Amino acid sequence: MKLENTKIQMRKGVLEYCILSIIARKEAYASDILNTLKGAQLLVVEGTLYPLLTRLKNSGLLSYSWQESTGGPPRKYYQLTELGEQFLKELDLTWNDLVHAVNVTTNHKSNDHE
């Protein structure tokens, strides 16, 4: 088993959550989302992001609006729908539970060996 494959799968597992969280802060253009993800070391390419955005929109979690751009064609800005906001709140709870569970099960400084 290759470590890099496991790392990639872990990142993919949280990608939707991260995208929804970014858009929840303020409506976002796809390149803004990509830059935020890259800045957080969640390396994502456009070929990964756009299908995810489409799936989230088709699921009713996102909507978008077109806005004029000063440097080219209009841009598509994404925002959470009401359903998306509720979905994200549930993901927040699930994430907190998951982080707690991982911290408990991976605590390497346990006193079990004393």
Image (cartoon, rainbow, N blue to C red):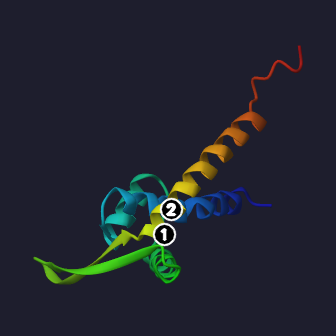
Please state if 47 lies on the left or on the right of 63 as rendered: right
Establish if 45 lies above or below 42.
below
- Local packing at callout 2 (Cα closer than 10 Å; few below 14, some 14-19, many 20+) is few
**Which quadrant, please, contains the C terminus?**
top right
Residue 77, horizontal then vertical, whole percent: 29, 74
Establish if 93 lies above or below 52.
above
Residue 28, horizontal then vertical, whole percent: 31, 67
Q: Residue at x 67, y 47 (%)?
A: 98
Q: Residue at x 43, y 68 (%)?
A: 82
Q: Residue at x 55, y 51 (%)?
A: 92
Residue placed farthest to the bottom in the image? 73
Residue 47, horizontal then vertical, whole percent: 48, 80
Q: Real-space Cα distance between discs 2 and 1?
A: 5 Å
Q: What residue did someone put label 1 on?
A: 83
- Local packing at callout 1 (Cα closer than 10 Å; few below 14, some 14-19, many 20+) is few
For badge 1, the amino acid type reads: Leu
Q: What residue did someone put label 2 on?
A: 86
Is there CB contact under 8 Å for labels 2 and 1?
yes
